[in-house]
Each structure stands twice: as structure tokens, then as C-alpha cells.
Image (cartoon, rainbow, N blue to C red):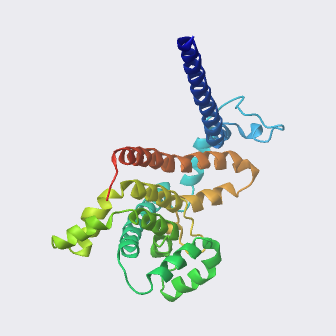
Amino acid sequence: MTEVKRMKASSKQAGKKIGGTVGIFVFLLVLGLFMVLPIYLAIVMSIKPVQELFIFPPKLYAINPTLDNFRDMFSVMSEMWVPFSRYVFNSVFVTVTVTVAQCIVASMAAFVLAKCRFPGSKVINSIIVVSLLYTSNVIYIMQYIVMAKLNMINTYWALILPSIASPMGLFLMRQSMSTMPDAMIEAAKVDGANMFTICWKIVMPNQKPALMTLIIFAFQAAWNIQGGTLVYNEALKTLPTVVQQAAMAGLARAGVAAAAAVFMLVPPIVIFMLAQKNVIETMAHSGIKD
């Protein structure tokens, strides 16, 4: 009888584990479908003919799929005053520069705030937390005045400089570096390492998950920079600005706008997939104990 009771208890526990696993799987599956749905709808809208874009009720599939929207998009872009390749270069140049500069500035500032003790550090940390509450729209006017005083209107600097200082990136890196054991830093100081060496050769190699997360956020934000209020020269405009101009041409360009949305969606997804893999691998193999 005792063996029978044990077998029944173990079978109940196994059933609960299987039921819990199935429930978690179903929940994650539904959540994943909700996340994939906007991407799916964007792709479907981009391959729909113009007459299907305004069917009511809207359909979740294309009746007569076509690639004419993408052809029209490149045709419209090629008729601009500046070659399409120039817009691509502007976006790539601004995005790469902003991403690299933001990672460097955020990492160095976060190291100082997390591991260096100086008067006013707590006040600065509080200011960073408060700055997370404000969006970039709040400082547009002040930003324009500063750029105008520095003669940076209609230059790449007007797009790059305002995006380098990111409160979210600085907060993310500071929180990650705060978990770094002080014993490692003290040991490096005893060995004669200076603060710059400690930051880049000891602390940063252990911050790859946070750094990869920062790269994802920085790239996505930089790729979507428009700068229409700071750059008026056609040769300096980025792809989001030009795509917005093309999409505002009326209902006839609705298909072009849908195709452009998919085109703009590809680079952030690629960077996300590459960086996400590194984040997962690094977090799986990392673990620092004091």
C-alpha cells in the first residue's frame, strides 16, 4: 500500500509539472504571437495592392500580393533631388557614429558614477533618474537654440551630438556596473592599474550583456532619427525623413509608405537578433562572485 501511495503521489507531482509546463508554453506562445503580429501586419500591408489597403473590414492577408510597392518606393526615392544611396549613407553614418559614441560615453560616465566616490555623486545619480521622466520633445526648442548658437544647423553634428548623451543608456550601464565587486577594482589598483585601464580592461569585459542591450537601444533610436527641425539640406537628410516626405504625398503613396516601413524595419531587427544572441550567451556564462 505504501508503494502504491508513493506511485500515486509521484504521478500527481509529474502531472502538476507537465500541466505547469504546458501552461507556461501556451502563455509564452500567445505573448509571442502578439509581439509578432505587428511585424506580420507590416509585411502584409507592404505586399498589398493600393486598392486592397482600404478594404473594410481589413483583411489579415493579401488577396493579390505584389512587389509593386517596393518598386514604387525605389522609383520615388530615385526621383528625389539627391540619389537614394546618399540617404542610405547618411542614415548608416549617423547611426553607426551615434551608437559607438553613445556606448563609449555611457560606459565611461557610468563607471565614474558607479565606482568612484566624489562629492555630488548622489545628486548626479538622482538627476539621471529624474531625466528619465522627460522625453526629447521637451527640449526641442532649447536644443535648436544651442545648435544655432554653435553654428551646427544643417550639419551632421546637429543629428549626432544630441543623441550621444542618453540618460537611459547611462542609467542602464551604471546599474550594471554597480553589481561589479569592489574587490576586483581594489586588486587592480594594488597591481598598479590606473582608472582608465580598470574601466576598459577589467570592468567592461564583464559588462557585455548590458553593453549589448545598450547597442540595441542606441541603434534603434539612432536609425529612426529624423532631424527635420535641424537639417534642411537635402544632401544631409536621413532615410526616415525622406520616407516620411514620400508617405505624405497622399493616398496614392500609401503602398509606398507601407513598403518603406518594412524597409526601415529590417536593420534594427538584424542588429537585435545579433546582439540578443551575444546577450544570452554572455549571461549564461557570466557570474561574478565577491
The residue under the point 33% across, 63% down is 181
Residue at the extreme right: 56
The residue under the point 45% across, 44% down is 273
Relative height, residue 243 to residue 234 (above, below): above
Residue at the extreme left: 191
The answer to which of 17 and 106 lies nearer the viewer is: 17
The N terminus sits in image quarter: top right
Q: Disc count in the image?
A: 0
Residue 193 visible? The answer is no
Q: What percent of the width, then of the height, locates residue 267?
A: 48, 49
Q: What percent of the width, then of the height, locates residue 165?
A: 47, 73
Q: What percent of the width, then of the height, locates residue 30?
A: 65, 35
The answer to which of 1 and 116 lies nearer the viewer is: 1
Relative height, residue 266 to residue 142 (above, below): above
Q: What percent of the width, then of the height, locates residue 194?
A: 21, 75
Quadrant of residue 70 within the rendered picture: top right
231 lies left or right of 137: left
Residue at the extreme bottom: 149
The residue under the point 52% across, 79% down is 153
The C terminus sits in image quarter: bottom left
208 lies left or right of 41: left
Quadrant of residue 39 within the rendered picture: top right
Residue 175 visible? The answer is yes
77 lies left or right of 91: right
The answer to which of 33 and 239 lies nearer the viewer is: 33
